[in-house]
Image (cartoon, coloured by chain):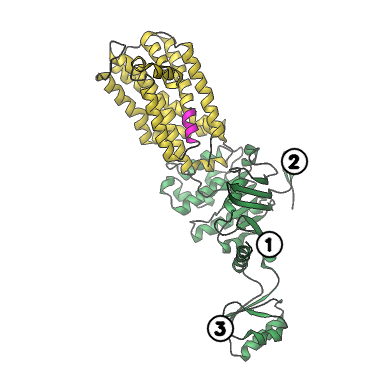
Amino acid sequence: MSGEPIGSRVVSHAVEVTGLDVSFGELVAVSDATLRVDYGEVVTLLGPNGAGKTTLVETLLGFREPTAGTVRLHGRDPRRFHAEVTARTGALLQRGGVWFPMTPRQVLRLTASYYDAPRDTEELLAVLDLARCAATPWRRLSGGEQQRTLLALALVGRPRVLVLDEPTTGVDAEGRQVVRGLISDERDRGCALLVTTHELGEAERMSDRLIVMSHGRVIAQGTLDELAGEPEMIVDLGAPVDPVGLSALLGAPVTLDGPLRLRCAVAATPERVGMVTSHLATHGVEMIALRTRATLEERYLDLVAESRATR
Amino acid sequence: MKAWWAQTLAEVTMTLRRGETLLLTVAIPVILLIFFSSVRVTSTPTVHRVDFVTPGILALSVMSTSLVALSIATCFERSYGVLRRLHVTPLGRRRLVAAKMAGVGVTEILQVLIVVGVGLALGWNPHGGARTAVDAAAILALASAGFAGIGLALAGRLRAEVNLAAANGLYLILLLFSGLVIPATSLPAPIQRVATALPSGALAEGLHRLFGQGRAPTGGDWICLAAWALAAPLVAARTFSFD
């Protein structure tokens, strides 16, 4: 982690949220959330609908006053130092729009005028594959084109922090590749990115760290490896098999996760893989796949289910 | 300054491209000017009806643009998420409000030129000279700032549908109870007193004095208009919600 010089200050964390509570009357939308994002990393915020992701993002961007706790962007309170913070921050919001008659080129040029040293607008139109529709009014753009225009608007001020609330919503496969490439480029030039998404595959591909929220709380955070938990063997089968024999062979409990999947909480050493393979061969059962850790989707669903069960 | 100027140009361009706004700000005032100048709806204190109606229509035009058109357009910008997006840029609340008010000012210059042109074509014979024109421009500018402040204060807090009704309702009340097209002397005494405290009432009285009698607006008119011009935009800037 390296600090970022901002004027006479050096800021350690691009985004810092500490003990954040946000309530709307009786409804607690975010409860005791603590997280940080450093310059040069992509952190993805995951969670089911209503988990509090958007409320957290909106509080971070100064739309809402925290009920308790603090939020800091570039080390500053985003409500008190709004002009300073927004000059260094780009954001793509859910329900963010553009004047209907304006074209991507017009709105990008207008938005560029808000910043001291904006990016070249024509270059951005080309990078985001918007050159073909640059003169089309906003209301006639497709959902994907609108989303890419909003992303261009978030990027035009050369932000040091990018907050992207579901950036790939409505974007086709080709467009997603463009968005992923941009996220990677921004990270490489030292930008901090906080991204919310429901696309677990996207999150797995682009994130340095992940944060999972449920019912307003941060229930887990870490790298993909850290979230995946302890090493384990997960075996997908062509036909059901009794786990008891395999359990004795491996010297550890083997559980059924559905009729055609076995899970055992041990590392997949070559010796153990050999044992499993020969055991299945003896019983005439085909091995479809063997994995050494849970997928993000499996781990995410487990975490959310645990969180629901403990409420 | 660069951001404010670019935003102001964008506001003017978008205003002039909105058909429904042009109807409200240009077509309706011109139709009302022609109608009230030609048809006797109520008695007027001038020999020629157009001499009374034209200053009132000038005031009404400014009110249509600054209050109703600006308020409705801004509120729809909020419901379409435009203001949410602007909130996360360095444009800022004060520059946005100032750009909107400047944009309205440019539109109103065009409006005034059209209404004055049509009024003169209908036989309007305004009193006074250059000083009258300067005073008229000053009270129109003050009133515009006051109306814009009221419009933005409504737009900054209300839902688009509620604001649509509120802005039009307020417009109707200000139109009927301020001596814009119906002489204030025809109104009941309590309403006359309220009218003089409203920006529309002070504007109408000031313009009628300037163009009808060749006399300067009263001190009360100046104070009323200046107070609204200062207070309403300040309230709007403080309470304006981007979300």
| Residue A146 seen in render | yes
Residue to which mark 3 is pinned: A238
Residue to which mark 2 is pinned: A9
Residues at marks 3 and 1, CA–CA distance in whole angstroms: 32 Å
Q: Chain of mark 3?
A: A
Residue type at mark 3? Gly
Mark 2 or 3, nearer chain start: 2
Range shown magenta: B149-156
Where is residue B143 drawn, in percent x and y?
Answer: 46, 21
Q: Is residue B151 magenta?
A: yes
Chain B representation colour? yellow
Chain A representation colour? green
Q: Is residue B10 left or right of residue A249?
A: left
Q: Nearer the viewer, residue B224 or A293?
A: B224
Q: Which mark is residue A223?
A: 1
Residues at marks 2 and 3, CA–CA distance in whole angstroms: 61 Å
Q: Is residue B108 magenta?
A: no
Q: Residue at x 49, y 18 (%)?
A: B224
Tell me where residue A223 sits by quadrant: bottom right
Residue type at mark 1? Thr
Residues at marks 1 and 2, CA–CA distance in whole angstroms: 29 Å
